[in-house]
Image (spheres, rainbow, N blue to C red):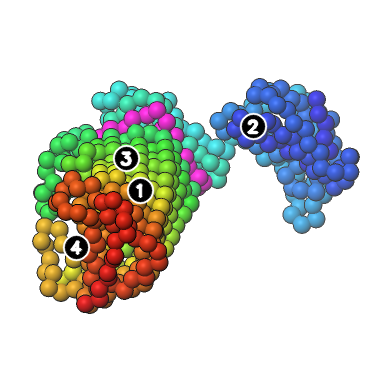
Amino acid sequence: MWGFSPTVEVVRENALPMWFATTSEVDRWGKESWCSIESENIECELQEDRGTSATKVALKIACSQGIPCDNIEVSDINLTYKGAKEGGAAISECSNVKPKVIEPTSIQMGKAICCLLLIAMVFRSHAVVVDIKARGAKGDGKTDDGPVIKKAWKEACAGGPSPSSVLIPPGTYMAYPPILFSGPCKGPVEIKANGATIKTPPELARLKSDSWIAFQHIDRLSVIGGTFDGQGHEAWKNQKCADTALSCQMPVNLRFSFVKNSLLKGITSVNSKYFHMVIFACDNINIEHATIDTPGNSLNTDGIHIGHTNGLNITNSNIKSGDDCISIGDGSKNVHIEKLTCGPGHGISIGSLGKYANEQPVQGIWIKNCTITGTIISGVRIKSWPGPTSTLGTATDIHFEDIIMNNVENPILIDQQYCPSNRCNKASPSKVKISNVCFKKIRGTSATKVAVKMDCSQGLPCENVEVSDIHLTYNGARGGGAGAISECSYVKPKVMAKISLRLVLDIASVIYTVE
């Protein structure tokens, strides 16, 4: 039994030791008192606590949502609130606790005693945990559990200011599109899907939206774990449908729009029909330990596409795709990508830019400590559209550093003549200005004779492109020839250190031209 002077506060966080903290107008020991209990199963008593509280909240017990406190005994508590500012009776705040109320407990204001019915009133958990299995989800991989998942989200989203959770237990769930998780919510919401696999039907006839699962207008979202299987094999056979957008819509596996201050951790996305993940108009997003997997011949299956987003960190992730591992579109700012493995795919790309009206600048992009293996078209790339319809844009403050290339086509590429399927007129130069770009500490092997290619805009030449500590060898698998070479035009470079582009790593002389 521990008896403390007011106020009494019990705090427990996950599986950490339980700490009882007490503060008062004059502590009996002359300082703040702490008592630590190193146990998972706590039985404790709060008895014979009496006196005055300088705070309106006289009794606070905030326990773990995952492992609620058990067998907390509260008896003979008599605390008086003497606050001069707020007035009213002293109150208690308690969550995630199973109490034992032995004797009447009074928290009083002056001589007026407010008897609290602790079981019914005080010890209520403000957090909401919604288990979809408990709400009727079958988890048999055949029944459409989408409606249950959507109802679970609505319940958690409306749960209140304390964190709420949607629990998707291990199993296989079918969820027909679209699945929309919409806010704003009353508090933080977490979706826990560790060990769960969620699938969408493979048939194109069931497509009703440009997204399978979409999150929008949410603050403080967490998505933890889960495998999201787009079953896209049939869709990959109909890529002209996705290219023309005439006969059907190809859905993105996971779309996040207007989401902020959020964490996506341990997510696996496989076999998406189109892009795996889209991050649009978001702020302060962290993606950690993501796994994205589709075959290299699955066209238009970009791993993560980013646009109009400020503050995005992607770390410790692995992406295999049939298109760009990561594509960074207009309006992207303060994007940090680190410890990423990419391949197969088309590498890590900024762009394409200059295709649409009113594009926003790309600025503050850091791609560091990554490994790119077996990608075609490029390793790291900046690309923009030429032609009379090319629109104004800028890309600046871009850094590619500490990158390993393993048998990669065009390891370093700036392509301002980007024109897939010859759908543009290259006679007119791109109107996107590229400046302040750094390629540093990039090494490995090139599958193409041209290891560094900078094909900048004749109308707006690239400026302040820094190239240093580049060591790329041509492995001779394609094209033949003695050594790796560079081809650069309409660029004003800063060559800061040795550049090695030879089969046997002797120093190559690299000449940049501004024509």
412 shown above or below 426: above
Mark 1 lies on residue = 404
Mark 4 lies on residue = 418
Task: Residue 290: say if magenta.
Answer: no
100 shown above or below 512: above
Mark 2 lies on residue = 16
Tell me whether circle 3 and circle 4 mark residues in contact (CB < 8 Å): no
Amino acid bearing label 1: Ile
Q: How many marks?
A: 4
Q: Quadrant of the C terminus?
A: bottom left
Of helix, strand and loop, which one carries label 3?
strand
Of helix, strand and loop, which one carries label 4?
loop
Mark 2 or mark 3: whose residue is earlier in sequence:
2
The residue segment tinted magenta is 178-200
Mark 1 or mark 2: whose residue is earlier in sequence:
2
Q: How crowded is mark 4: few (under 14 residues within 10 Å), some or many (20 or more)?
A: many
Q: Residue 179 location in percent, x, y?
A: 31, 41
Amino acid bearing label 3: Ile
Q: In which quarter of the image is residue 180?
A: top left
Amino acid bearing label 2: Leu
Q: Residue 378 location in percent, x, y?
A: 24, 53
Task: Residue 193: say if magenta.
Answer: yes
Amino acid bearing label 4: Tyr
3D distance between C-alphas at marks 4 and 2: 54 Å
Q: Quadrant of the N terminus?
A: top right
3D distance between C-alphas at marks 2 and 3: 33 Å
Mark 4 or mark 2: whose residue is earlier in sequence:
2
Mark 1 or mark 4: whose residue is earlier in sequence:
1
Tell me whether circle 4 and circle 2 mark residues in contact (CB < 8 Å): no
Q: Residues within 10 Å of mark 3 (few under 14, many from 20)?
A: many
Numbered badge on residue 292:
3
